[in-house]
Amino acid sequence: MDRRKFLKNTAIISTGMTFLGSEVLAKKAGSTNPYEFIQLRQSPLTYGIDGLEPKISSQIMDLHYNKHAAGYLKKTNKFLQENKIKEQNLAALIQSDMSDTFLINNLGGHFNHEIFWHSMTPQKTTLVGTKLLAQIIKDFGGWKQFLEQFHSAASKVFGSGWAWLCWDDRSRKLIITTTANQNNPMMKSENKGYPIIGIDVWEHAYYLQYQNRRAEYITNWEEIINWDFANQMFSSILNWKN
Ligand code: MN3
């Protein structure tokens, strides 16, 4: 399918829903696509650029949010403008049969980073008493086993990519998976599941602070995971899919 035809087929008028924080996501739980919070703009960070110090330096956050991630959004916008697409449902687009590498890389980049910023928080969050924790224990055999598998998957990504905790609707299980470059698990080419949280293991995400010590970055990242967001995403995905 050529680019123009494909975009015409997948162009859906945006719902115009605004997203300012995970509270909104919780209120929107229902049949709504949980990824609709991802729009053609960057969500404002719910913490300061130095809010994740010392786990992630403000220098990294500044470059990552204001340069790298902003760049993916800019290029996605450019692509949509050049193809005369005024509004776009990004959640539907990311799951469509995309064949254009430029769009895969840049829309994927924007989409992945939007999930990434929400996957982190300086607040201490916990899964105690949640549905997600019960599911993690059921599917991975325990909390420790889950963390070990997540850590191992993120460590083993060769080159640039991501590790994800996903819901696999086919097996009705949580899975840990990885994607290369800026691919997202929901892309047709990946077909892996619905991401709940994800860690960026591109060197731009950690190298200035951790150099080649990716494992140390992952360990520290695990301590700033926003489990409230993860649990809300999990509930929203289940509601959406049921
Ligand atoms: Mn990145």
Image: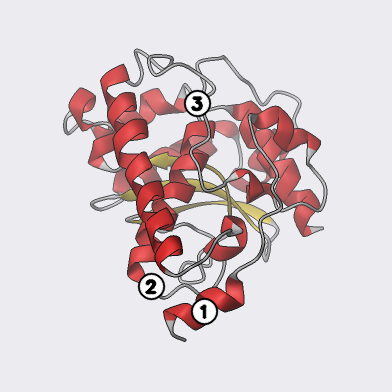
| Residue 119 visible in the picture | no
Q: Earlier in the sequence, mark 2 or mark 1?
A: 1
Mark drawn on residue 6? 1
Position of residue 220 measured from the top left corner of the image (x, y, whole percent): 38, 23
Residue at 66% of width from left, 26% of height from top? 127
Identify the residue at horizontal 50%, vertical 65% (top origin): 187
Say whether mark 3 is within 8 Å of ligand 1: no
Query: Is 17 in front, or is 85?
Result: 85
Query: What colour scheme does the image use?
Result: secondary structure
Give the CA distance from mark 1 to mark 3. Answer: 33 Å
- Mark 1 / mark 3, whichever is N-terminal: 1
Which label number is shown at residue 45?
3
Tag 2 near tag 1, CB within 8 Å: yes
Asked if the residues shown at circle 1 and circle 3 are in contact, with their CB atoms under 8 angstroms apart, the answer is no
Q: Residue flagged by tag 1: what amino acid is it?
A: Phe
Query: What's the residue at 23%, 39% (across, down)?
Result: 203
Instruction: Report the front residue among 232 and 70.
Output: 70
- Residue 140: x percent and y percent? 59, 44
Numbered disc 2: secondary structure: loop
Disc ID at residue 100: 2
Q: Is residue 26 visible?
A: yes
Tell me which amino acid carries mark 3: Leu
